[in-house]
């Protein structure tokens, strides 16, 4: 039997770095809200059974209206998120019960996730416990000390830039968030601290997260 999979979509950010009045999930990309692209791919993937959105308080009704407008049938809940992405994910995990085997977490501001990324990340997380989509680091990276002097130059052949989806067995990510502490920037970071084995799935440089106006312009070129 295939695993039951719930997708959590953190979308509670204000998007201040975009410099626009509209909340980031609802900023238009080629005439459609940014968040609608990721939701469409998740909703249309047969491997996904349920979608939970983490929303800023004032946008809950807007997300419900968006799901209805675009007929995203798998969007079952819109949860009020926290001040950080991790707090938003934690709020969503509270309603994920034992009927689900796998939890897939994908940023609402990453519109170019693919069905193959979703399906393969689920397969690898089921096999190993967790999986992070990531791309090889293409630039030379410098490690600086507190005085802003170079301390080390890591071997970039072993370095990857983490993206989403980040996918886990339910018990792995639940355990990770049970020890939640502020300052963690991604879900895998929490899971790693529990000793979980996390696989890397090589993703795509197109799977960008829209944060700035420059990102939005680049996304318009990619569509």
Image (tube, helix red, strand yellow):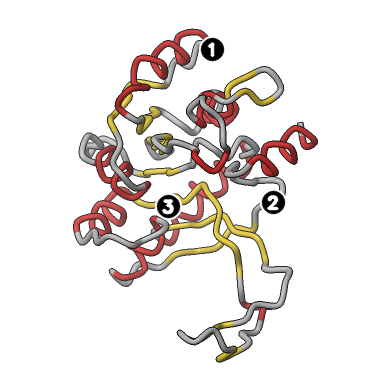
Name the residue located 50 percent from the left edge and 55 percent from the top edge: 124
Count neighbours of disc 3 (C-alpha within 10 A) and say few if under 14, some if 14 to 19, many if 20 or more.
some
Q: Nearer the viewer, residue 220 or 91?
A: 220
Do tag 2 and tag 3 residues touch (Cβ < 8 Å)? no
Q: Is residue 133 left or right of residue 136?
A: left
Q: Is residue 203 left or right of residue 66?
A: right
Name the residue located 37 percent from the left edge and 43 percent from the top edge: 103
Which image quadrant for residue 11? top left
Image height check: is 200 above or below 115?
below
Disc assigned to residue 70: 1
* Extreme residue toward the top, this view: 69
Residue holding disc 3: 126
| Of the image marks 2 and 3, the number of the one nearer the N terminus | 3
Spatial CA span between label 1 and label 3 = 30 Å
Name the residue located 59 percent from the left edge and 45 percent from the top edge: 209
Name the residue located 68 percent from the left edge and 17 percent from the top edge: 31
Residue holding disc 2: 204
Instruction: Report x, y in % for residue 195.
Output: 32, 72
């Amino acid at each position: 039997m295939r695993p039951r999979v719930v997708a959590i979509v953190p979308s509670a950010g204000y998007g201040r770095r975009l410099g626009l009045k509209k909340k980031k999930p609802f900023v238009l990309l080629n005439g459609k809200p940014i968040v609608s692209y990721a939701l469409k791919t998740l909703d249309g993937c047969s491997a996904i059974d349920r979608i939970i959105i983490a929303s800023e308080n004032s946008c809950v009704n807007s997300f419900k209206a968006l799901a209805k407008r675009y007929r995203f049938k798998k969007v079952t809940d819109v949860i009020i998120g926290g001040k950080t992405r991790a707090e938003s994910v934690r709020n969503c995990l509270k309603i994920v019960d034992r009927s689900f085997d796998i939890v897939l977490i994908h940023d609402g501001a990453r519109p170019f996730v693919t069905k193959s990324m979703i399906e393969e990340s689920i397969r690898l997380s089921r096999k190993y416990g967790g999986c992070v989509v990531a791309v090889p680091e293409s630039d030379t990276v410098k490690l600086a000390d507190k005085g802003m002097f170079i301390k080390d130059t890591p071997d970039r052949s072993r370095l990857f830039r983490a993206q989403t989806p980040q996918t886990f067995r339910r018990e792995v990510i639940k355990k990770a968030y049970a020890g939640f502490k502020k300052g963690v920037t991604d879900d895998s970071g929490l899971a790693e601290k529990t000793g979980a084995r996390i696989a890397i799935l090589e993703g795509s440089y197109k799977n960008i997260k829209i944060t700035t106006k420059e990102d939005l312009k680049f996304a318009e070129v990619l569509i």
